[in-house]
Image (cartoon, helix red, strand yellow):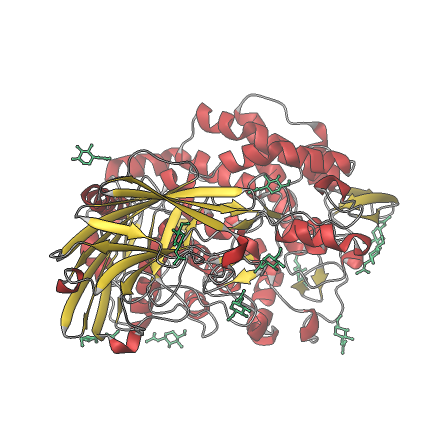
Amino acid sequence: MHSLGLYLYAFALCGVAYAKPGCSSKIDRRKVVQQFNPHRNTSSDTTPLQVGNGNFAFGVDVTGLQTFQPFGTLSTWGWHNFSLPTTEGQTSVEDFTGLDWWTHGRLVNYNQPNPAQNDISQWLIQNPQRVNLGRIGLAFNGGDVTEDMLEGTTQTLDLWTGRISSSFKFEGQTVVVETWSDSHSDTVGISIESALLSDGTLGVFFDYPLPTRNKFDAPYVGVFNATANHTTTLDRSGENRASIRHDLDATSYFTAIQWDEAADISRPINDSHRYLLQPGSGTTKLQLSVAYSPISIPEVVPFDNISSASASWWESYWTSGAFIDLTSTSSPNATELQRRTILSQYLVASGLVNNGWYGKFHLEMPIWHSLQFARWNQWPLLRRSMPGTYDRFLESSYARAEAQGYEGARWGKMTDPTGRSAPGEINSLLIWQQPHPMYYAELEYRSFPHEDTLSSWDKVLTATADFMASYAFYNASTKVYDLGPPMYPVSENTNPNATINPAFEIAYWRFGLDIAIQWKERQGLEAPANWFTVRDNLAPLPTDGDTYAVYEGIPNMWKNTTVQDHPAMAGIFGLLPPPSSGPSLNMTLVQNTHDHISQLWDIGDCWGWDFPMLAMNSLRLGDVDQAVSYLLHPLFEFDDAGYPVGGSRVATPYFPGSGSFLLAMAMMAGGWDGGEGLHFPEGWNVKAEGFLPGL
Ligand SMILES: *[C@@H]1O[C@H](CO)[C@@H](O)[C@H](O)[C@H]1NC(C)=O
Ligand SMILES: *[C@@H]1O[C@H](CO)[C@@H](O)[C@H](O)[C@H]1NC(C)=O
Ligand SMILES: *[C@@H]1O[C@H](CO)[C@@H](O)[C@H](O)[C@H]1NC(C)=O
Ligand SMILES: *[C@@H]1O[C@H](CO)[C@@H](O)[C@H](O)[C@H]1NC(C)=O
Ligand SMILES: *[C@@H]1O[C@H](CO)[C@@H](O)[C@H](O)[C@H]1NC(C)=O
Ligand SMILES: *[C@@H]1O[C@H](CO)[C@@H](O)[C@H](O)[C@H]1NC(C)=O
Ligand SMILES: *[C@@H]1O[C@H](CO)[C@@H](O)[C@H](O)[C@H]1NC(C)=O
Ligand SMILES: *[C@@H]1O[C@H](CO)[C@@H](O)[C@H](O)[C@H]1NC(C)=O
Ligand SMILES: *[C@@H]1O[C@H](CO)[C@@H](O)[C@H](O)[C@H]1NC(C)=O
Ligand SMILES: *[C@@H]1O[C@H](CO)[C@@H](O)[C@H](O)[C@H]1NC(C)=O
Ligand SMILES: *[C@@H]1O[C@H](CO)[C@@H](O)[C@H](O)[C@H]1NC(C)=O
């Protein structure tokens, strides 16, 4: 452990400029950011450009609205349940029984789909799903207009202010659209300028979809033609104002629309959910605000307020936190890393795009989504969810552990807002999400070594460590504590009944228990004895010849690509620091494992965060060029607007790619304990500021 005091001293002395020796450089951040503003001349059919604030996001096509492409309008609060099954004995959540599996000589109940209860099992997987709140587009009245009938379509997303500016010509007339999202509410600000508004040719439509039961709803969420299954109601609540209520089963929410010029709003076709806002004659500019909310709201934020709030929020986002400037390096590799960095920074802060896994959150994934906020010194964004989400899920996680005969809190996996984890064999048997709170807590303490930090995480860490210690099984013949079976490791492709002591999980259990113990020591408290007992007698890291192995006894790991998947054993020295208790890593094995992965692993079967995870392993081993080549691997692609392409296994965008990429970049720019400073290829001219070294 390096002296925390030293970091803080350097941090305080140099303000935001830590990593630059002498701390003198002040990067022209605006210039760097705006250099990567995305421009499009046609709509993408896979990703929108988007405005958003992390809790709300609005994706648009080339018109600046959702005119041709019904991209999503997503929030953190909009969720929907389809009605429960009516099958005898499966009509309520309580009817679901899961399955009992043998676990070290006793039957333990797991939250897994029960073949005898297929309907309720599927319902629990598919519900609730995140709702696409609605669609807003330009209405070309009296014409079936398609994108190719527009001329000169062009648009730019200004990352510095969060504004999308779009323009085109229709029938020889120019249309200019500006799109913004409010920073403090779920409101879109829209400005439309065109002579076409004045004669009724151009208006604005609003439409409402019904959710689907699709696991992946991308690039569009919901369907617009199942109009009979849900209802909408228009309330013309004022001269320049209307509200539309959307009811779908037990879910209802409101759209409040406010505009600045005389206009009419109506539903031209009774059995559709499409509404039309038509400005009065003579209008050449229309500004409107559209606010989505779970309850009817009395006042909508005006357009001007939205644009100024967005501009100031984004400017403060870009000027606070850490920053990397690679623009003085001419290598195209540096330019591409910079582009990915800036666009990822935009996307992790703006947020939601479509639905994967019904829009639920997976508790092993925050490490790839949001741990980077800690490393990039973006604490206000991280604190929106941490530790609050763990606090909120604590009760259901205690219950999960207790029902299985464990102590503490067992965090779920594919989780809904109430903390319920969806049934699934993998969902119920994955364990690497358990120590995540320790990583968050430790990074927060590094930045804020205060009592408040200790107390804000203490309950969560205690509950987590209690579970981890009680989950580990004392094997009387080997005299060590085993993890599993049954379990799924990070790579979700093993036989759970034969999976024991995976390298990453063993290393992570030690890491987690080390931090939990230290957390108690910092508070002058004594850690429970079983935390020490388990930590000090954990099964050794599994090996295969002169390398570390995915799990103990994995057959033919380097030759049989079928058993390969996520190479998580690379995470034990990369994502994770070397152990601070117990036996040291054998660095010969670490190096061999790294080299074998680059030569023998089926990289074609890797995706998303695998590449940053491998890059972090290369970085810690001092192989910067290999790290860069992982980060720029052809299978780790980012599109023109910076969305990580999903590849063959997941939908696009696959956002864990963005956050894990930023985590690896923070390691290159901020270093780590024992590897402080910059880690970039020879000859690169790099400026970085605002980073503390990682663990
Ligand atoms: C869009 O059109 C402009 C003007 O014609 C052109 O300069 C630009 O290169 C085009 N951009 C893209 C991404 O095609
Ligand atoms: C969906 O149903 C579950 C189970 O009854 C309930 O806990 C949850 O609150 C519901 N969610 C919504 C959005 O209706
Ligand atoms: C694992 O064991 C349980 C019994 O404990 C059995 O029901 C299940 O089918 C087994 N799973 C696999 C993949 O072998
Ligand atoms: C809605 O559209 C989809 C795709 O075009 C089609 O498969 C489905 O039958 C339509 N549903 C209704 C209710 O019209
Ligand atoms: C609409 O409701 C009907 C009747 O309940 C149902 O059969 C149909 O599947 C629903 N359509 C969609 C798209 O959910
Ligand atoms: C739509 O419904 C309204 C009232 O419910 C009715 O007055 C009107 O005639 C209907 N319009 C059409 C086109 O069916
Ligand atoms: C909008 O901004 C104006 C001027 O700054 C301010 O007076 C007003 O309260 C704001 N309105 C809302 C709803 O935020
Ligand atoms: C003890 O460990 C050995 C080696 O990992 C394993 O084969 C055996 O099944 C374990 N015993 C129990 C009771 O889990
Ligand atoms: C590390 O592993 C290598 C290769 O298996 C072995 O030769 C060496 O003795 C090990 N080193 C230690 C310190 O255990
Ligand atoms: C490779 O692994 C798969 C999955 O465990 C197994 O079914 C197959 O027999 C193995 N092939 C060889 C050649 O070992
Ligand atoms: C850019 O990175 C690739 C690996 O991704 C490497 O092969 C190439 O040599 C690098 N180019 C330069 C100019 O450094």
Q: Answer above or below: position of 686 versus 189.
A: below
Q: Answer above or below: position of 528 versus 491.
A: above
Relative to 383, 417 lies left or right = right
Query: Ligand 9 is located in which of the four quadrants?
Result: bottom right
Q: Position of residue 346 (x, y in %)?
A: 33, 54
- Whether residue 659 is visible here, answered yes or no, is yes
Q: Position of residue 78 (x, y in %)?
A: 47, 45
Q: Position of residue 629 (x, y in %)?
A: 43, 71
Q: Position of residue 607 (x, y in %)?
A: 53, 67
**Residue at 51% across / 49% down in the picture?**
367
**Residue at 25% across / 50% down in the picture?**
264
**Residue at 24% across / 74% down in the picture?**
150
- Can you tell which quarter of the image residue 197 is in? bottom left
- Towards the viewer: 93 or 309: 93
Relative to 108, 544 lies left or right = left
- Towards the viewer: 207 or 394: 207
Relative to 32, 94 lies left or right = right
- Whether residue 28 is visible here, answered yes or no, is no
- Towards the viewer: 115 or 8: 115
Q: Residue furthest bottom?
A: 148
- Can you tell which quarter of the image residue 353 is in? bottom left
* Callout count: 0
- Towards the viewer: 185 or 20: 185
**Residue at 41% across / 46% down in the picture?**
233
Q: Answer above or below: position of 439 versus 576.
A: above
